[in-house]
Every structure is written in C-alpha cells, then in structure tokens.
Amino acid sequence: MLRNRRHLLTIMATAMILSACSSTPERPLRLLTHDSFDVSTAVLEAFTAETGIEVEVIPIGDAGSALNRVILTSDDPEGDLLFGVDSTFLTRALAADLFLPHRAAGLEFVDPTLIPSDDRVTPIDFGDVCVNYDRAWFADAGLDVPSDLASLAEPAYAGLLAVQNPATSSPGLAFLLATIERFGEDGAFSFWERLRGGDVLVTEGWSEAYYGAFTHASDGDRPLVVSYASSPPAEVLFAAEPTDSAPTGVILDTCFRQVEYVGILASTDRVDDARRLVDFMLSPTFQADVPLTMFVFPARSDVALPDVFVEHAVLPQRPITMDPARIDAGREAWIARFATTVLR
Amino acid sequence: VIRPGRGTLLATLPLGFLGLFFAWPLALVLGRGLGVDGEALLAPLLDAVRDPYLRGVAWFTLWQALLSTALTLAVGLPVAAVLSTLDFRGRRALEAATIVPFVLPTVVVGSAFVALLTRLAPVVDLRRTVAAILLAHVFFNVSVVVRTVGGLWRHLDPAPVLAARTLGADRLRAFLHVTLPRLRPAIAAASAVVFLFTFTSFGVVLILGGPGRATLEVEIHRATSQLLDLRTAAALSVLQLLAVVATLGIYDRTRRRLAARPLARTATSLRRAAGPTDRAAIAGAVALLAVVQGLPLLALTERALRVGDGWGLAHFRSLGAPTREAVLSVAPAVAVRNSLLFATAATITAMIIGTLAALAAVSGTRAGRLMDGALMLPLGTSAVTLGLGLLLAFRSGPLAGRGSILLVPLAQALVAIPFVVRTMLPVLRSIDDRLREAAATLGATPRRVWREIDLPIVSRAGLVAAGFAFAVTVGEFGATVFVARASNPTIPVAIYRSLGLPGQINLGRAMALSVLLAVITGVVVLLIDRIRVGSVGRF
C-alpha cells in the first residue's frame, strides 16, 4: 500500500509540475461540437490527406451547454473552432464575441435565407423541428392526423402530445418559438394554456420524449411528439426489419427551421488551418456526408441527397423562422413564462 | 495501535486529494458566481432563499430525499438480514445482483420504468408521480443498505443473540435489543449515503416526475448549462452544500453517541439455512427484491430483446460493430474495454485514498474526524458544478486535453471514495481492541498485531468496498462525460449516443448495451466478492 501511495504522489507531483509547461505545438486542430455531431471517418481522413491537418472532434454537451461551456472558458478554450451554434443561440454567441470573421469558399451555393448578416459564423446545415406522428396509431384509432399547429390544442387531441422543456432542450425551445412566431406572444401562451388543459406531456429532453413517451418508439402513450423532419428517414434507415415505408410522419405546418453554424474561435493560434477546415465543411464532400451522419439537410443546395432522404424526408415550403435578435431578446422571459404557464 | 501522529500522516494524502480535485475546482466555480462586481457575498444566497419557487424546490428536494431514504431502509434492512445471517445456494449471486441497478444510466432506467408503469397503469397509474420517483430511488439505492449494513452484520458476534434467546427472548426481541443497537453505525452510514444520493437526484426526478418537479440539482443544472446564470447556480450550490453539511453533522452526532461494539472473532455470523422459518425468510427477501429491482430489470431486458413485433438477439449481435464508420460512432467492444480500464483505475485510486482515510478517521485524531465528513462532500455536491470546476481547474497541463485519460478515473474516484470509507469505517471501528491487546500481551509486535488482527478484517471490508467502488465508477456518467474525450467513450456514453437518434436499431442497441453493462457489473462484483485475502475466514 505504501508503494502505491508513493507512486500516486509521484504522478500527482509530476502532473502539477508539467501543468506549468505550455502545450506542444504538434497537437491536432480541435473542433468543439455539440453531442449530436458526427462525420464519416473517410470524409475527415480526406481532409487530412489533402491538407496534412489532423482534426480532433470534441463533443462538449448539447447545443446550449456546448456554447455556454465555450463562453465560460473563452480566455483559454478547449478548441480552435466551435460547431453547432444554432439560430436560437446565435445572438448570445455573437454578443460574447467568440468568433473571427471568415467568408467561406462555397458560400455562393448556400440558400441566401440561411446566411446570417454577420460573417463571424458559417452555415453548415439546417433542419426542421416538427411534430411527428405515429401512422399506425392514428390509423388504428380512426382519428385524423392534426392538420396544423393550431389544431393540436383541440379537445380531440388531448393527452396525445409530448413536447420538451424549452429550458433544457433545443427542439423544445424551437417548438415554443414556433408557437410564439405563429400566434404572437399572448396568443402563444393561451395556446399553451389550452395544451396544458389537454394534458400535454413535457419531458426534459428529446430522448425522454421520443424513447419514453412516443407510441411508435416506446411503451408510452403519446402518438404525437416534437422531433425533426428527418426523423422518418432515420426510422426507415434504422428499422429493425427492412421497410419501404416510414412508420412516422411529419405535420408540415408545425415546422420551425434551425440553422447550425461553425465559427473560428478568436483565441486560436491556428487561424489558417481553422479557415481551411471551415471551407472543407462547406465543400461538397463534407456537405454530402451531413444527411446520414447528423440527420439534417446540407446548407449547400447543389449536393445530392441520399435516396432515403429523397423518399422519406419532407422539406416544408414555408417553415416558421424567427429573427435571432428577437429570439435572444425574448428567450429567457419566454422560457420563464412557459414554466409558469405549463409546468407549475 | 494507530498512534495519533500516524493518523495525521494517513490523513495527508486523502485531504490533499480532496483539496486538489474537489475544494479547488469548487472554489473556482463558486468564485465566478458569488461576490462578482463588489456585490455582497451573501446577496445571491438571500435572493435564492427569498424566491418562493426555489423555496418550494428546496422543500421538495428535502422531503423526497427523507422519504426515499426511509423506504430504501424499509426494503434494504430485511434483505440485509437474510443475506447476512443465512447461507443458502445463490446467496452471493443475489447479493451481487442487488448492485446492478446502481450502474444503469438514468435515461435507461427511466425508459424501463415507463414501460413498467404503463403496463401497471390499468391497475394503478403511477406515471409522473412522486411515487414513481420514490420507487426508482429504492431501485437504485437498496444495495447501499444491503452492502453497508450487511457488511457489518455478518461480522457480529452471534453469542449475545444466542444468550438472549436462551434467556427467553423471542427472535424479534433479540433482534431489537441485541442486534439492532449494534447495527446502528452501519445503518446511520447507509442512511447518510442514500440521503445524499437522493437529495442530489437529477435524471430520475426529471424523467419520472416530469419537468414540473425539480430538485435543487435540477435547478443548478438549468442555471449553469442553459441559462448561463452562474450567480443563481453558485447560490444554489452553496445551499445544497449547507444542507449536506448539516446532514453530515447530524450523522456524526448520531454516530458518536453509538459506541462501537466488538465484532465476532469467527469469520462470519452466517449459518446454513434450515427449516421452514428460514426458507420463508429467504423467499420473502427474494420476493421483495424481485418486485423493487427484478421487475424494472426485466422490463429493460424485454426491450433489449424486442425486435420488430417479435423477440430475438439481433440487437446483441449488432453490438459487434459501430452502426457506421464515423468519427464519433462507438464500437461497443471499445466502450466495454474503456469502461473496464477506467473503472479499474478509479477503483484502485478510490481504494488507496479511501482506505487511508478510513484508517485515519478511526485513529480518532482531529484530522481524521474532519476527513470522515469531508470525504462525503463530493457525494452531496452538484455534479454539474463539480464538472465545471474540474474543467476550469484542469484546462491546461497533463490532466487536461489528452491527459484527461488521467482525469477521468480521478473524477470517478471522487464519487467512489465515500463508499469505500462508509463501508470500511463501521467495520474498522468495531474491531475489538481487546483482541489487539491480547495479541500484544502474547508478545506480538505491532506489525504482527496489524497483520493478524486488523488486516484480515480490513481486507474483508475492503473487498466489499472495492465491489462498490467498481460499480459506482463503471456506470458513472456525469463527471465522465464532462472530462472524457470522444476518443475514449465508456458504455454509458455509448448508450447516450445511441439514444440520440430515432430508429428501432438505435433504441435496441442502447438497451442491449445496458443489459451488457448490468451483466458485466454483476459478474465483476461477484468475482471481487469471492476473492479471499490471506487467512481470512480461518483466524
């Protein structure tokens, strides 16, 4: 035991001495992301082969926590770039002055509505948060699927919807914003009062709603759940037994668009390498990889979508959107009002 | 035998560890939230206390923790009684099985409970009730009572009970007047741990109670991770810590009122089960465990086996490879290897620090007593606060970045140490000093006394503690995910990643991985429990 103790002391003493030294220059370029990020191994290797730059991907929590973590450590962050700031948190990120300006190559192929006025962030992908429904459940119940956002509060659909808490969940916040944009603030909260009267289920995060309450994916009792427009193709791709038809559908009128951005952290000493990575993330190689690794749509409109997306994913023609500045100004008050209206 | 000077020396390493990996990181976080811009240090605290909503949260946190602790004791004590007095076939396996729930990720347990409560709903609808939270807390924590109390119980000298029985006391009377008083130190220790665990409960409350119900831990998490409101987060962390210190104060007073009783010199008070009374007692314990722990585990296994509309092993077979060749996709085999490596390193660390701490605490010096309580503090501290603190404290240097391979087991050990100390202390305190004196009188050197008297008892308690520490660390998620890197995913991390995407395969993999985690834990704990050190059992 004594020997072990001395050994541990040695480790800890060495640790403290070494921590005074600076880090080595030959480290890989570090891409901080939210937990839902992924990229095919071959795609990232292609970047390294082309540029000689090694990339380390470091997931640091869900979208909100990842940004907050970078803000809290902004004097000495854990990485060189941050991916995954979305439109709902864009203003907070810009206000914290985290990023360097960069105009990425390939931006001309991106739908102009996705490009923010500020050039400190680059759009990489977008996705729509929509209410999903369990096709089999509605067929068995002989009930029509709700046609639009407003009808979700009708008595016929009481006890059927699961949403996420906007205080802790990115899709939850998006859905709350959708109702505010559509009905106005007061209208939205009277809509939420009616949903509460109809026993809406609020869960902490997406997994708890989808795998804990949604009838298609759990033993729960909710055939309507706030999820993504890309969830039906994922259900086909990840079905236990091969299938041609998606077991779930999307109510198009409820969709709220989220755009995800990447930014170069101002504190990095690898600005040129970071710029090359951003350009790569907007290149056709990376963009074509986005649908099946992250289940979102590529920002570039000139890359082909995989078959399962073409067949089973729907893109709403007029998704609900909200100006990032308005989101930032209202977010906390709306979350608080949601808590008093729906939760307490 | 342990001289005061040595007690202080023994306490140095544990206190240093605690200072470096707990106190300093915590101070960094609290410093960012309190007393900023010349504001009075107490102002955020007063604001939090004045907020009627937060007062309600604090009250709910307290009463649900008290009720959870009481219920866990009510289930755990009868089971501990059977497992530590009666020997029967399958006893060890049953004891190892009670610890399995401990390692399961809360989101998985939540899913299993939802499945169970949905089926139960036509009879009694417990969905999204406090009852569901309490049931889950009992499910998780029963093993704390079974192992802590059982660890002491089976070393009790059976002679006084036999004497009482001979003098005409019935079983109940003999238990209440002879056995129970001697068990009190362990019961107090188990209650303190269960209380701290449920007081800082997070995932269970969110998933089973719904977001309408929140504990202080939930509010700290929201303030830190989502609202970026470190002022409120720090204030709530301090309040939580004060409550924990108060609990530990009460525990310490209780403990000191209870004088340690001598232990049996025989290895165990276990006797072979015989007769209908014994068989009924065993059946009762098994039935109790089957309801509070077996049913949710069964629901979990059923989900792992469900493929489409039927059942099969497809999800288990799919664990051989990642779902796709992507950077953050985890090959389950790699996650299993990482989990075993990290948990082993963390268990060894926790055992070294925890044993030194327990020895120092039992020496009765001031440093030892201080540490007894201080080492419990990490259990009662918000995981998100501590995680953020570790992050701020070790951002550069070898303990950060790639060196986080070192930081992961250290962070995990922080959570496991209180278990090691709690398990060992009641046993250490109960070693009969007369045994040592007798050995010394017979001419044994202090070293020999230690080897012949203390070591066998210490190592037996140590093995129980090691099993515990392993189970705690192999399932640890909060600290791990905060400091671990993507290149080193553990099983719980792989489970969470699987649950991040829609599709039956993803859910099936998560559930199959959970079953695998449960089985690995059960087997390892069973193996640790079977280890025999030196002359244990025959002295």
Image: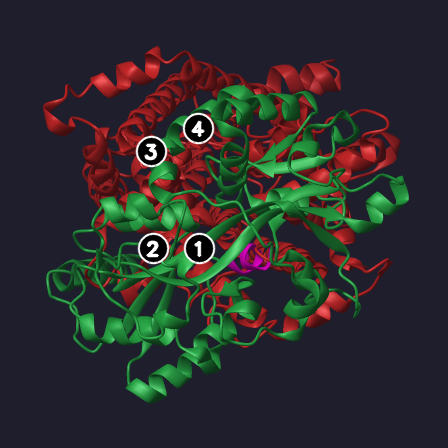
Chain colours: A green, B red
Amino acid at pointer 1 = Val
Disc 1 and disc 4 on one polypeptide chain: yes
Query: Mark 3 sits on what residue?
Result: A329
| Residue count near mark 1 (Cα–Cα under 10 Å), binned few <14, some 14–19, many ≥20 | many
- Where A265 falls versus A142 (above or below)? below
Q: Report the magenta residues as a range.
A: B492-499
Label for residue A259? Answer: 1
Q: Real-space Cα distance between discs 4 and 3?
A: 10 Å
| Secondary structure found at label 4 | helix
| Contact between labelled residues 2 and 3, with CB atoms less than 8 Å apart | no
Out of B122 and B78, give the one closest to the viewer: B122
Q: Is residue A116 left or right of residue A98?
A: right
| Residue count near mark 3 (Cα–Cα under 10 Å), binned few <14, some 14–19, many ≥20 | few
Query: Mark 4 sits on what residue?
Result: A334
Residue occupying the point 17% across, 21% down: B41
Q: Which numbered disc, 1 or 2, marks the residue that appears first in the sequence?
A: 2
| Contact between labelled residues 4 and 2, with CB atoms less than 8 Å apart | no
